[in-house]
Image: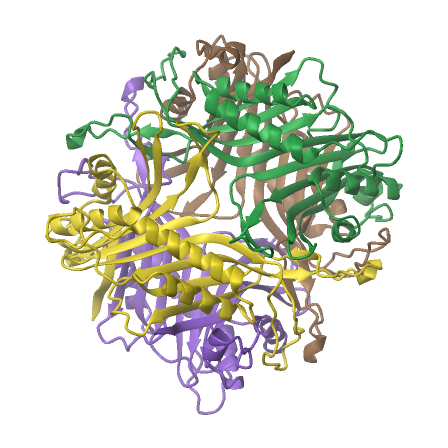
Chain colours: A purple, B yellow, C green, D brown
C-alpha cells in the first residue's frame, strides 16, 4: 500500500529589513527567513482538504508583523519566537522549523543613516519547536580563509590511481560552512518570571566565529581533516554552551604553477586557484555527553 | 570529553565527458561525479596521520580511469562500480557514497558528431556501498512545469495574519526536485554468474519521469501538497522496482496582475512571475512495506 | 567643468507570463522585459527635479497593461510597441530601448494546459526607437553545442610562453551567444494601411538559429575563429533580412585526460570538461553594404 | 558581399594567486585576469590559417610567468605590462585589452600567514594598448550601500500607467558598479629614465572609492539619478587624475510593508527587500575637457 511519509511545508526566503530609528544613529537588520511547518497534514496530501493548512502567505505575513511588534534582536530569538507562535497558535501544526540567514552591514562614512554591506560570511540559524521543547543550531557559511604556509600533506595511501606527490608546504584554503548546536533548550525569549535567562546569542556567535578563525590560523595542518577537527574542538573548548559542531570544508585547491617551461622557478609564489573538482571534507565534533539532537539538524 | 562524530571526505564535481566512437554515429555521456568515503579515519582527524587516506586526487583519477576501462552506461551502474571499488580495494574505507549528475545532449542537425545540450532537467543518482550491501537513489532536478488551469486553493485556515483570498483557478508552477529509492540491493553490474540481472536503470528512469509529468498534468489540484502526493504515488504505481519517493516542490508563484488602475480587466491572462519568497512543499511517498532505507538518503 | 554625459534609466527584468486561453489548448509566453529611456533628463541628475521622469514603476505597469491590451506575439513586435509608446507619449523621452528575453515551453504529456520548460537557449531581442526610426537586434544565448571530431588546431605562433601541442582532432564546444541586426527599419506592427508588411520575426529567428546550428555541425574547424565566421556567414546567407551578426563564443575546453600513469591509453575517449580559464572568441560578420547601425547595439 | 568586422580573442578568467613571502608577514594578491587581442586576424577567420594566432593558452601562461618575473603590485600596472607585452612582442597583434578583477583579503587573527577574504566589492581595471598609446579604466562593482533616510521621490510624471505614490522618505539602496577613466596615457611602469612618474593606482583607487561612499551617504536624494550624478561629480572633484566616471546603479527596492491588515502601523520600520524587477540607472559624469576616450571603454 502507498502511504504518506514525513512532510513539511512553508514559505522560503522571506526577505525582511528592519530599521530601528533611535535618534540619528539608525540600526539595520537584514534577514532571509524560511519557515516550515508539519503536523496533521494527511488530508491536504490525500484529498486536497486544506482545513489544517496555515497558508505560506500567512507565514510570510507573520514574519513581517512580528518584525514590527517584537523588533528583531538576535536571529535565534526571532526564529524561536516565530516557531513557538506557529505551533502554539495552530492546533494542526505540531512542529515548526525556522531558518534565518543574516547579512551584515557596517556604517558608511561615519554616517548614522548610511550603511555598507559587509560581504564575507553569512550568519545562520535554525530553530525547531515541537510544542514542548526547542532546539537551536547556529552557524555561518561562506567564511573564506587561506593559509599561505603551515600546511603539508604526506604519508597517504598510494594505490594504482595515486599520482599526487607528497608536499611539505602548500596553500590551504576553504570556505567554512559551520553549524553548532546549543546544549540547552532555549527559553522562549519573553523573560517571564522563573524562566532560564536568555542566551546571549550574539556573544556566543562571536566566540564561535573567533574560535574557528583562530584554530584555522593556528593549526599546523597535516590534512584538512585535522584542521576540521581542530576548528570544531576549539569551538567546544571556548563555548561551553555548545555541544556539537558540524563542518563542511571544501578544499579550494591552489596549485603551484610549473614555470619550468619558461625557464623560471616557482618558489611557492605563483598559484592557480582551481574551481572544480574540489576536495570536500565533512565532519562532526561533539561532546561525548551531548544530549540527543532530536530534530535539531533536520 | 570532545570526540569525533560522523565524517566523510572525497572529491566533489569531477567533470567527465566520455565519447564512444562507433563508426560515424558518436555517443556522448556528460557527467559530474562526486565521491565520498568514510571508515577508519580517526587518526587523520586527531593527529593528521594520513595512512588511512586515499587521496581525493586518486578518487578523481579513478573516475577518469574507470570511464576508460569500463565505459559509462547508466550512471547508476557507474556509481555502483566506483563505490564498490573504493570499499573493496581499501581496508580503511568502510563506506562509499557516489553521486552523479548527468546532463543530456541531443544530436545537432542530424549530424553523427555534433551535439546540442538539451537544457531542462538534470538526471541524478546516489549510490552507497558498505562492503556488503548497496543502496541506490535515482532522481532528477530542475524539471520546470506549469499548469495554466485546474488548480484551486480554498478552505485553508484563516488566522490573524491571513490575507490571501481563496481562488478557484490559479497557475500552478514548480521546479521538480525528485529522488526515488529502489527496493532491491542492486547487483554489482558485472553480470557474473549467479547474480541478479542488472536493473535497466534507463528504462526505470524514463518511467518515473513520465509518471511525474503525467501526474502533474493530470491532477486537478486543490493544493501543491495534493499534487506532490499524486506525483509520488504515480511513480510508485508505475514503477514496481521503486519503494520510496521524496519530492521537494517550490511553489513558483504567478500572481494575477491587478490592471484595474488602468481601466483593464485581467481574465486570467497576465501574470507576474515572482522570485522570492516562494512556498516550499516537501514530502515523502512510500510503500508501507518498503525495506529500511539504511544510508540511502545520506 | 564637470558635466553630465550619456545616461538612461528604466525598469529591468519585469517578468511577465501571458496565457492565451483559446478553448482547451492554452498558449503561454514567458518573458523578462527590461526597458530604458533617455531624453531631456539633465534636471533630474543635476537638481533632482523629477518633472521629466516617467517612473520605472510606470514602465513596469505599462508592460503588464500592454500584455493585456495587445497580447504578446513575437517578442520583437512587443518590444517595438513598448519602445514607440514611451517615446511617442512622453515629450521628455527621446529614445527608448526595450530588451526582452523569452523562455521556451513545450506541452507536457499532450495536455492542453500543462507545460514543461524547454531549457536550452534563451531567445533575445533589443529594440530601439528614437521618435522616427527603429532598430531591432535579435538573438539567442546559452545554446550549448559540441563537436566530437572535425576540429583541429595547428600552425599557430610559438612564442616563449607557448607550450600547447598541436592537435589534429579535438573536441570543440561552446555556448553560443549570438545577436543579429535586421536591415530594415521595422514597421510599427499595427499593420496600418501603407505600412511595410510586418516582419515574420519567428520565421526569421528559426532560420537564423538553424543556420548557426548547421554551420557549427558542418564546418571542419581549424580554429574557433573560423567556426565563428562560418556561423555568421551562414546566417547572412540564409537570411536576407539580416545584415550583421555578432558572436561571442567561449571555448569550453575539453582536455583529453592522460591515463598513461594508470597503464591505459586514451584514444580520444575520456575528457575533462574545464571551467576556467576559457578561450573567448568574439567577432562580427556583416554585409559590406549594411546600413549604419545607429544605436542598434547600445 | 559578406565581410569580417571587428573581432578579438583571448583567454578569460585566468585565476592567479601570488604570494610574497618577506619573512613571516606574507602578502597575497588574488586576481582574475582576462586578456584579449586583435590585429591581423583575417586569415584565421576566413581560412583557419593560424599563423597570426598567439594561442589563448600562451596568453594564460604569460600571466603566470609574469606574476613570477615581475611580481604583482597594483592591478593596473600588471594589466598594462601584459597589454604592452602582447602588442610589442607579436607583429600580428595590434591591440591588447587586459581586464583584471581583484579580490581583497585581510589578515586572519593577527597571523602573518593566515588570511580572510573580505567579501564586499571587487576592484576592477581594464587596460588597452595599441602599440603607441595606452588607456586605463579603473573601478569597482558589488559595493552595496543603503541609506535609511534622506531619500524622497516626488514630482514625477503621472501618465495613465502611473500608480506609484510620492514619498518623502524612503530607503535608497544600490549595488554600485562604477568605472573611471584616467586622463593621462599611463607610463609603462618600468620607471625608465625620462618616463612620467608611475601613477599611484592604489591611492587613486582609495580616493575614488571614498568619494563614492561619501557622496552616497552625504547626498539628500530626490532621485537615484541625482545621487548618481553626485557620486560621479565627487570622484572628479576629489581625483584630478580622473576625467570620466560611468555608473550603473540598480535601484534595490525596499518596499514598506503594509501591516494595517494586522492592526499594526509601520512607521518606516519594516521593509520587504525585493529582487525583480529593479530600477536601473546608468549615467556618465565627465570633465568637459576630457580627452577622447579612444578604445578605453571597449
**Between A41 and D114, the one nearer to me in the picture:** A41
Relative horizontal placement of residue A100, taking residue C171 as reference (left or right):
right
> Splitting the image into 4 quarters, where does residue C167 fall?
top left
Relative horizontal placement of residue D22, taking residue C231 as reference (left or right):
left
Q: Which residue is drawn at 68% across and 45% down?
A: C33
> Splitting the image into 4 quarters, where does residue B204 fall?
bottom left
Q: Where is residue A182 shown, x and y percent of the image?
A: 36, 73
Residue B206's place in the image compared with B233, above or below, is above
User: In the current view of this chain or complex, which residue is farthest to the bottom?
Assistant: A194
Q: Where is residue D46 shown, x and y percent of the image?
A: 52, 12
Q: Can residue D187 be seen in this view?
A: no
**Between A249 and C178, the one nearer to me in the picture:** C178
Residue B43's place in the image compared with C118, above or below, is below
Q: Where is residue D51 shown, x and y percent of the image?
A: 44, 9
Image quadrant where one finds the C terminus of chain D = top right
> Splitting the image into 4 quarters, where does residue C279 fall?
top left
Q: Where is residue C143 shown, x and y percent of the image?
A: 52, 35
Q: Can residue C265 be seen in this view?
A: yes
**Between D253 and C125, the one nearer to me in the picture:** C125
Looking at the rendered structure, the number of numbered marks drawn on it comes to 0
**Between A190 and B78, the one nearer to me in the picture:** B78
Residue C172's place in the image compared with A293, above or below, is above
Image quadrant where one finds the N terminus of chain D = top right
Relative horizontal placement of residue C40, taking residue C223 as reference (left or right):
right
Amino acid at each position: 500500500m502507498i502511504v504518506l511519509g514525513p512532510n513539511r511545508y512553508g514559505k522560503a526566503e522571506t526577505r525582511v529589513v528592519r530599521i530601528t530609528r533611535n535618534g540619528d544613529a539608525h540600526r539595520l537588520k537584514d534577514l532571509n527567513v524560511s519557515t516550515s511547518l508539519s503536523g496533521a497534514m494527511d488530508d491536504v496530501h490525500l484529498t486536497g482538504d486544506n482545513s489544517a493548512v496555515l497558508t505560506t502567505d500567512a507565514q510570510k505575513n507573520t514574519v513581517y508583523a512580528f518584525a514590527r511588534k517584537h523588533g528583531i534582536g538576535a536571529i535565534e530569538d526571532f526564529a524561536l519566537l516565530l516557531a513557538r507562535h506557529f505551533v502554539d497558535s495552530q492546533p494542526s501544526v505540531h512542529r515548526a522549523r525556522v531558518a534565518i540567514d543574516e547579512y551584515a552591514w557596517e556604517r558608511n562614512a561615519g554616517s548614522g543613516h548610511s550603511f555598507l554591506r559587509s560581504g564575507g560570511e553569512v550568519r545562520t540559524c535554525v530553530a525547531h519547536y515541537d510544542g514542548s521543547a526547542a532546539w537551536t543550531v547556529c552557524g555561518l557559511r561562506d567564511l573564506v580563509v587561506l593559509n599561505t604556509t603551515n600546511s603539508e600533506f604526506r604519508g597517504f595511501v598510494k594505490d594504482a590511481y595515486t599520482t599526487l606527490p607528497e608536499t611539505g608546504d602548500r596553500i590551504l584554503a576553504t570556505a567554512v560552512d559551520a553549524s553548532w548546536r546549543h546544549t540547552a533548550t532555549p527559553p522562549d525569549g519573553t523573560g517571564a518570571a522563573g524562566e532560564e535567562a536568555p542566551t546571549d546569542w550574539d556573544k556566543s556567535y562571536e566566540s564561535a566565529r573567533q574560535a574557528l578563525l583562530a584554530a584555522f590560523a593556528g593549526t599546523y595542518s597535516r590534512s584538512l581533516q585535522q584542521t576540521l577537527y581542530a576548528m570544531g574542538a576549539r569551538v567546544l573548548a571556548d563555548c561551553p554552551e555548545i555541544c556539537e559542531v558540524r563542518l563542511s570544508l571544501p578544499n579550494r585547491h591552489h596549485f603551484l604553477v610549473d614555470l619550468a617551461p619558461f625557464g623560471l622557478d616557482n618558489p611557492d609564489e605563483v598559484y592557480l586557484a582551481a574551481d572544480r573538482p574540489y576536495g570536500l571534507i565533512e565532519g562532526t565534533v561533539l561532546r561525548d555527553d551531548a544530549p540527543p539532537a532530536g530534530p535539531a539538524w533536520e
